[in-house]
Each structure stands twice: as C-alpha cells, then as structure tokens.
Amino acid sequence: MKIEKIELHHISMNMLHRFETSFGVQTERPCVVVKVQADGLTGWGESPAGDGPFYSPETARTSFLILKDFLAPMVAGKDFAHPRGVAGLMRRVRGNEMAKAGLENAAWDLFAKSKKQSLKALLGGVRDRVSVGISIGIQPSIEALQARVAEVLGLGYGRIKLKIKKGCDVKPMTAVRERYPKLLLMADANSDYQLEDAPVLKELDPLKLLMIEQPLPYYDIIDHAKLQARLETPICLDESIHRLDDARHAIELKACRIINMKVGRVGGLTNALAIHDLTQKAGIPMWCGGMIETGIGRALNLALASLPNFKLPGDISASDQYYKNDLTRQFVLNKEDSTITVPDGLGIGVEVDEGRLAGYRLQHAAVTA
Ligand code: OSB
Ligand code: MG
C-alpha cells in the first residue's frame, strides 16, 4: 500500500488534573496527531512528546518539525507491504522515537482497517479487557496525597503509582502503605536519583512495593544493575529503554526485573512487538506505560496491552482522569476488576472528532506523495 497524504496536527489540550513529576509540572498536554490516507481509508497515530525536553529529548514541536521535514517525505508515496516497512523507510533518522511512532502507528491503524481487522486482532492480542492502574502526581502535602489516593480507590482503580522525587519519597510512600497494607502500590522516580542514593531507595524495601520505576538517570542501564543487586524491590525501566538492544542489555545485565513499554518511547509498534517477544522469552514481565495520551494513543495502548506478556496493570486510566473533551469517545473503567475494555472496531477502533482536533490546533502541515 502507498500513503497518499500525511497530515500533521500539533495540538495542545488542557488537562483535568495538574501532573507533577520529578521533571516538572504539567497542566497542558501538547502532542502531534498524525493522519494518513490511502485507498479511501484513514489511519491515526499520536506522537506523545511533551512541552519541553524533560522526560526525553523530544518535544511536541521537535516531533512536528522532524515529521514534516524528514519522516513524512520519506514515507509519502512509498510502497510497503506491511507497517513494519514504514519503520524501515524511516530507519535513516536517528532517535526521534516519538515522532516516528506517530507516523508508524498511523500506518498500523490504516493497515488493520485495510485488512478489515481490529488492531488487537492484527497484533495477536489475547484479552478483551486490560488491567489498568492510575499514576498520581506529586502532591503538595501528605493530606492531599491521601485524599487523592482515597478518591481514585473509590473510583475502582486497583493499582496505584505514586510519583516520587528526592526528598519526597519514603515519607509519602510509607504514609500510603500504612493506610493500605494490601494495595498494589508502586513508585516512579523519573530518573531523579544517583547510585549513591541507594540507601534512601533501600528504605522503600519494607513497603513491599510492586516495583520502583526508573530510579536512576534516563540513559543508564549499568548503575541500575548495581542498584537492583542491592534492592529487594523490583526495578522497572522506563526512560532507559528505546530499542530492542536496550531491553536485551538490561536483561543480560539484570538491570531490572520488569519493563515499562511505551510505544512512543521505542519508536512505534514494530519495536514494541520485538521487545514484547524478547521479554516474554526472557521471563521479564511488561506493562503498558502512558504518556497522558489522547483517545488516539489510548486506544492503541489498549490493543498493545492485550498481548500476552503485558502481565501487570498499565498506566491506561479512564478518559475522565485526563481530558474533558477528548479527541475520541471516552474510555471508562470497569470498576469490578479495574480494567478497560479493548476497542474491537476496525483498526484502533475509535473515531476521531476532527472538529475538536481543529479547535486544539497550534500548527498544521500536509505532505503528499
Ligand atoms: O514516567 O510514566 C511516566 C506521564 C508523562 C511522562 C512520563 C510518565 C507519565 C505517567 C503518566 O506516569 C501515565 C499516564 O497516565 O498516561
Ligand atoms: Mg515512568
């Protein structure tokens, strides 16, 4: 198939909840929505980089630029037999994983639609509902944190992740653990610590956390291996994993016991599937991370998380935890089992509200064959 037209929409949406992590505070969510057209069909993808280069080196504006000047011209009008081929067409571009993911994933949606299949079926998903949890940002006080935890437990979330940073870690984690001894609880440090902080991280061991996500620098694997050897709590890598070789190195060096899969961070579904198969063989469970995606990215995450090695609850909360007026229909939590139902329509299985998309738009470009 050949993509005839690629449209890029750099948008920004207001978030319902302020989200604070060790790398900053977010109240608005920019991203680039990618629309591709071929043979009368439309495919959608999302490049989920943020406002600034703080989670990763990419930003929404750099994704837009790289897509417009390099990636879209490499793909428009070129023949491919499978969306993996789109990843191949973009291989010359180094890094810029989130930019690539938006375009490659739009091609997957398009391809699934052309085969009259849901993305879940195309990827080989094995479940209709995906276990989900919620990620709670750093709160101004322990009282505010306890109130937010109680609120989301009341909504039915069965796994809670708390963001931590230096100086705001053992106290809040312990307070929540004391109130909920059996809760599936975990921490995400977003790379705020160094190996010499191991004694503080060791203080989290008695809390029996499900895992601690990315304690050390965003580029590191080796120090994580040294840290994991000293901790009982499983380490989960997020920021450090961008490609299959990173996952292989992390597993070989025992740098983590769990991997967070974000399709944007690894450059698209082709790499995500390769990492899925590697971790499955190695006995390293994965879960689906989130980048506060719009309904487009959320629908794709649900399809991806229906694969067999997604063994732990994902950061795929219901739409009402993110946006008032999302680009697609809302996703709701099945309260009885803390799951979200995987869309079973063609492709990603959701329609995009193009009126809303235009309303959120900051920049637009179109690239044709
Ligand atoms: O580290 O997992 C992270 C959001 C933005 C950037 C990084 C992260 C996050 C989250 C939120 O934790 C996950 C979500 O609900 O989408
Ligand atoms: Mg993380």
Image: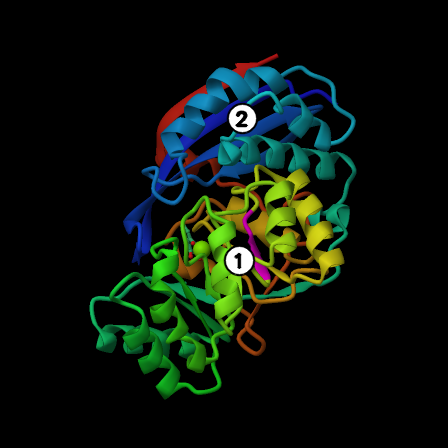
Crowd rating for badge 1 (residues with CA inside 10 Å; few <14, some 14–19, many 20+): some
Residue 130 is a magenta residue? no
**Is residue 260 covered in magenta?**
yes
Q: Foreground residue, 352 or 77? A: 77
**Could you tell which of marks 1 and 2 lies nearer the N-terminus?**
2
Crowding at label 2, few (<14), some or many (≥20) Cα neighbours within 10 Å?
few
Q: Nearer the viewer, residue 340 or 87?
A: 87
Where 66 sits versus 161, above or below?
above
Q: Which mark is residue 53?
A: none
Q: Residue at x 34, y 55 (%)?
A: 192
Q: Position of residue 11 (x, y in %)?
A: 38, 35
Q: Main secondary structure of the magenta part?
A: strand
**Residue receiving disc 2:** 94
Of residues 357 and 108, the one nearer the viewer is 108
Q: Looking at the picture, how far across and down is residue 296, in whole percent?
A: 53, 44
**Quadrant of the image for the C terminus?**
top right
User: Looking at the picture, which amino acid does disc 1 mark?
Assistant: Ala
Q: Amino acid at mark 2?
A: Arg
In the image, residue 236 sits, relative to residue 218, either above or below, namely below
Helix, strand or loop at disc 2? loop
Q: Which mark is residue 225?
A: 1
- Stretch of the chain drawn in magenta: 258-262
Depth-wise, is mark 1 or mark 2 nearer the camera? 1
Which quadrant would the N terminus be assigned to in this image? top right
CB atoms at circles 1 and 2 under 8 Å apart?
no
Residue visible at 53% across and 75% down in the picture: 335
Residue 82 rendering spot, x and y as whole percentages: 76, 31
| 284 relative position to 150: left or right | right
